Every structure is written in C-alpha cells, then in structure tokens.
Amino acid sequence: MPSTLQILITGTHTGANNQATLTSSSSTFVSDGVQVNDVVYNVTDGSSALITAVTQTTITGTLAGGAENDWDTSDSFRLWATEVNLIRLTIKDTLGYPLALE
C-alpha cells in the first residue's frame, strides 16, 4: 500500500470461508470511524478493496489483486484511511478555532 495511507485497524475474519464480505465479530468498525471509500487489505491473500458498505462488524468491498480475492476464516486484515477521508479532519489553532484549508 502507498506510504501516504495510515493503518486504522487490524484483525481477522471470523466468518466462513470464500466470503465477499469481511466479518469480524469483535470489531466496532462504525464506532472506530471506518467509512465508505476507506481501503481494506486482506494480508493473507494480498488483495484489497475500496469499502462500499460498513456496519459495526462487517465490511463490504470487491477484493482484487490477491491470490483468491475473498475472505476465509482467520484471514488477517488491515484497514486504511484514504487521503479523501483524511481531509475530513478539523485542524484548530492554539485557541481552539478551526483553521480554513485552501
């Protein structure tokens, strides 16, 4: 993955083999700030996907570029924030006022 992206979350797929949707029963994706257009990486098979849907414990996106391009039980994953989502951060000055970025 490009070095301009940051790792948000790591874990393992707890669902069945050969799945299109990542399931991680102990995750809290929505509460952790995962959003559509973030990137998920299947470390085990080398595939990745742009996230198209997210719930507290599941992530959907079309995996590509890997050995199998699916989720198998115990596959390791990493979640990446895209540059688009990094822009949503609010930067404040020393007095706590938001700064405008142009």
Image (cartoon, helix red, strand yellow):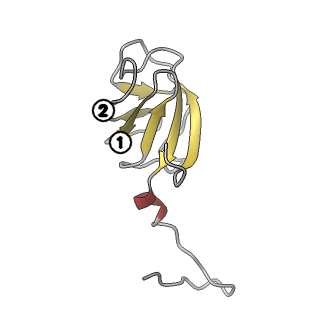
Q: Position of residue 79 (x, y in %)?
A: 51, 40
Q: Is residue 74 above or below residue 90?
A: above
From this viewpoint, is residue 26 visible? no
Label drawn at residue 4: none
Q: Position of residue 86 (x, y in %)?
A: 48, 61
Drawn side of residue 32 relative to residue 85, left or right: right
Task: Check if mark 2's residue and mark 1's residue have beta carbons within 8 Å.
Answer: yes
Looking at marks 2 and 1 on the same chain, the residue that comes earlier in the sequence is marked by: 1
Work out whether residue 24 or residue 102 is closer to the camera in this orientation and state it.
Answer: 102
Q: CA distance from mark 2 to mark 1?
A: 7 Å
Type of amino acid at the residue the image marks with label 1 = Leu
Q: Tell me where residue 47 sits by quadrant.
A: top left
Secondary structure, mark 1, is: strand
Structural crowding at the residue carrying mark 1, measured as other residues with C-alpha within 10 Å and reported as few (<14), some (14–19) or many (≥20): many
Structural crowding at the residue carrying mark 2, measured as other residues with C-alpha within 10 Å and reported as few (<14), some (14–19) or many (≥20): some
Q: Is residue 92 above or below residue 81?
A: below
Type of amino acid at the residue the image marks with label 2 = Thr
Q: Residue furthest right?
A: 94
Drawn side of residue 56 relative to residue 12, left or right: left
Q: Is residue 54 above or below residue 24?
A: below
Q: Position of residue 15 (x, y in %)?
A: 45, 18
Secondary structure, mark 2, is: loop
- Residue under numbered circle 2: 62
Position of the C terminus by quadrant: bottom left
- Residue under numbered circle 1: 50
